[in-house]
Each structure stands twice: as structure tokens, then as C-alpha cells.
């Protein structure tokens, strides 16, 4: 699974939106995901396919339904590539500061 | 800050440049697990999955073991007093060879309905474990961390 596919998959607002929906609640069907987007079923399927090929979405069959799950491991691998145990604390501190200031503004 | 409720079924997957046998060994033998699983020495034998972190030791039931393809076991968060009081959940490891010397490893942690704090706690943990396992098998070294 190469990083190019992950970056390409993330470089699209609709696909990020689909990941956001799955982050809120995992294990959704195509029909559920489709109902929240102004897009044809075929369009949503195409985007999910790109996410699945990049390893960002994993599907599982449960009975007659195909459920979609967010798989954050490829994002973690990109994180590990540039952020190690020592820089992680500093990066997290700055990220927390940003959230803190922006949420209370 | 996230206000998202942790999922009662969680699925994680990673592609690793290794054979299914190497991955099986890495998830069932303590000399491997201690290098990527938060330092835990984990051993699968005699129908149980034994874990040890420092002085804390516990074990879980193995529900299915089909080396080097599939391992299903119970999960109890005995490493933390609060989490340990929750109901046991279940972990399934699926190991599927792909083309080109790559193997897909999928972890499903489910039956978490009676263990909301465990569900929250393991979400980041599995990401760390799987990325660490990939790094260990592909480079022979634990994650820088």
C-alpha cells in the first residue's frame, strides 16, 4: 500500500467528507452514506472504491449488508514517517494549543 | 476535542511485506509482541492467550485458531483497573496473502457494547500496534518510540 494512493484519496473534499461521516459512526452501508451526499449512488461507490484501494476504508459483510469502516492505520503510518516519539509531544502540544485557542475564540 | 462515541465494532487493517507465517508468529509469540505491543509479552498456546506487562499477568480464551490464517480470542483490559471491570469483548485477526509478497492483516475488535471505556482506549492502541508490527516485520526494528 503506497503513500501516493493515500494522499490521492485524501486530496478530494467528497472523500474526506465520507471519512468524516465514518469517523462519527462506523459500519455504515452505501445507502446510508449516499443519503447524506448530493451525489448519485454510482458516484459515491466510485469514491468509496478509491478510499478502499488506499486502505482508508475496509468493508465487511454482515448478513446481507456490506458495511464500511474507517481504517486510520495508513494515516498513522504517514504520521510515523515524519513524527517520532520525541517530536510527538511538541507537535501534540501545539495542536492542542491551536484547538484550545480556536474553540474558545 | 472529539465527542464521538467509541464504536462497538472496530476494524483496522494493514498491508505488510511478510509471509502469513511470519505474521502468525509475530502475534502469538512473546519475543515478538514485546517489541510492538506496548511491551506486552503475549503467548498463544493450549487454547489460551497469555499476556504479561510488568507484574500484571492475565489470560483470555482462544475461540478459534487456524494458523496462519485466523485467530479469534476474548479481550479483557486487565492492564487498567477501571477498564478491567468492564465486560469482556472479542478480537479477530485475519491474515490474507496478496500478490507480490504482501499480506493483509485485519483486526476486528467487536462485542464492545459492555465495554465503552475499553472501546475508547483501544481505538488509538490498535493503530499503534499495527503500525509498529508492520515496521518490526519490514525493518526488523521496533518503531522509533
Image: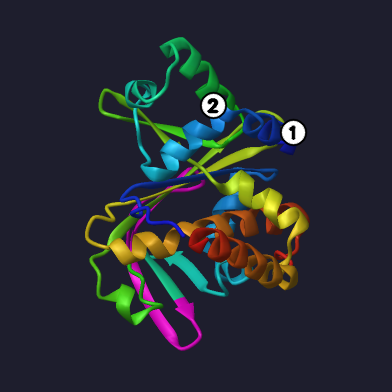
* Above or below A4: residue A94: below
Q: Find out whether the residues at labels 2 and 1 contact each other: C-beta distance under 8 Å.
A: no
Q: Quadrant of residue A63 in the image?
A: top left
Asked whether the viewer can see residue A40, the reply is yes
Q: Secondary structure at mark 2?
A: helix
Instruction: Tell me if mark 2 has few (under 14), some (14-19) or many (20+) residues whose alpha carbon lies within 10 angstroms of its own.
Output: some
The spot of residue B96 in percent (x, y) is 54, 37
Q: Could you tell me how many numbered marks the image carries?
A: 2
Q: CA distance from mark 2 to mark 1?
A: 18 Å
The spot of residue B63 in percent (x, y) is 31, 54
* Above or below B142: residue A40: above
Residue B16 is a magenta residue: no
**Mark 1 or mark 2, which is nearer the start of the sequence?**
1
Kindly identify the residue that appears in the image at 73 percent across and 38 percent down.
A3
Identify the mark at residue A4; answer none if there is no mark.
Answer: 1
Which is nearer the eye, B66 or A30? Answer: A30
Left or right, A57 with reference to B78: right
Q: How is the image coloured?
A: rainbow
Which is nearer the eye, A8 or B100? Answer: A8
Instruction: Tell me if mark 1 has few (under 14), some (14-19) or many (20+) residues whose alpha carbon lies within 10 angstroms of its own.
Output: few
Chain containing the residue with disc 2: A
Q: In this figure, which residue is indicated by the disc labeled 2?
A: A14
Kindly identify the residue that appears in the image at 69 percent across and 65 percent down.
A91
* Above or below A59: residue B130: below
Chain containing the residue with disc 1: A
Q: Which residues are magenta?
A: B52-75
Kindly identify the residue that appears in the image at 30 percent across and 25 percent down.
A65
The secondary structure making up most of the magenta span is strand
Q: Quadrant of residue A37 in the image?
A: top left
Identify the mark at residue B79; answer none if there is no mark.
Answer: none
Asked whether the viewer can see residue B47, the reply is no
Left or right, B43 with reference to B19: left
Amino acid at each position: 500500500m503506497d503513500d501516493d494512493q493515500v494522499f490521492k484519496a485524501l486530496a478530494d473534499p467528497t472523500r474526506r467528507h465520507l471519512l468524516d461521516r465514518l469517523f462519527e459512526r462506523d459500519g455504515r452501508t452505501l445507502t446510508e452514506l449516499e443519503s447524506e451526499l448530493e451525489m448519485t449512488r454510482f458516484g459515491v461507490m466510485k469514491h468509496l472504491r478509491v478510499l478502499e484501494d488506499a486502505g482508508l476504508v475496509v468493508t465487511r459483510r454482515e448478513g446481507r449488508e456490506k458495511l464500511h469502516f474507517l481504517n486510520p492505520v495508513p494515516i498513522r503510518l504517514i504520521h510515523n514517517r515524519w513524527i517520532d516519539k520525541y517530536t510527538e509531544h511538541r507537535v501534540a502540544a501545539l495542536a492542542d494549543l491551536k484547538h484550545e485557542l480556536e474553540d474558545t475564540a | 476535542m472529539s465527542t464521538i462515541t467509541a464504536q462497538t465494532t472496530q476494524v483496522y487493517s494493514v498491508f505488510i511485506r511478510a509471509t502469513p507465517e511470519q505474521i502468525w508468529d509475530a502475534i502469538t509469540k512473546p519475543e515478538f509482541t514485546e517489541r510492538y505491543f506496548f511491551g506486552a509479552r503475549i503467548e498463544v498456546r493450549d487454547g489460551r492467550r497469555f499476556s504479561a506487562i510488568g507484574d500484571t499477568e492475565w489470560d483470555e480464551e482462544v475461540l478459534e485458531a487456524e494458523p496462519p490464517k485466523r485467530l479469534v480470542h476474548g479481550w479483557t483490559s486487565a492492564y487498567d483497573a477501571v477498564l478491567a471491570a468492564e465486560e469482556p469483548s472479542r478480537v479477530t485477526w485475519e491474515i490474507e496473502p496478496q500478490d507480490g509478497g504482501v499480506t493483509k492483516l485485519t483486526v476486528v475488535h467487536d462485542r464492545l457494547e459492555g465495554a465503552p471505556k475499553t472501546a475508547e482506549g483501544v481505538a488509538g492502541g490498535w493503530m499503534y500496534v499495527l503500525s509498529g508490527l508492520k515496521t518490526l516485520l519490514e525493518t526488523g526494528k521496533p518503531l522509533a518510540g
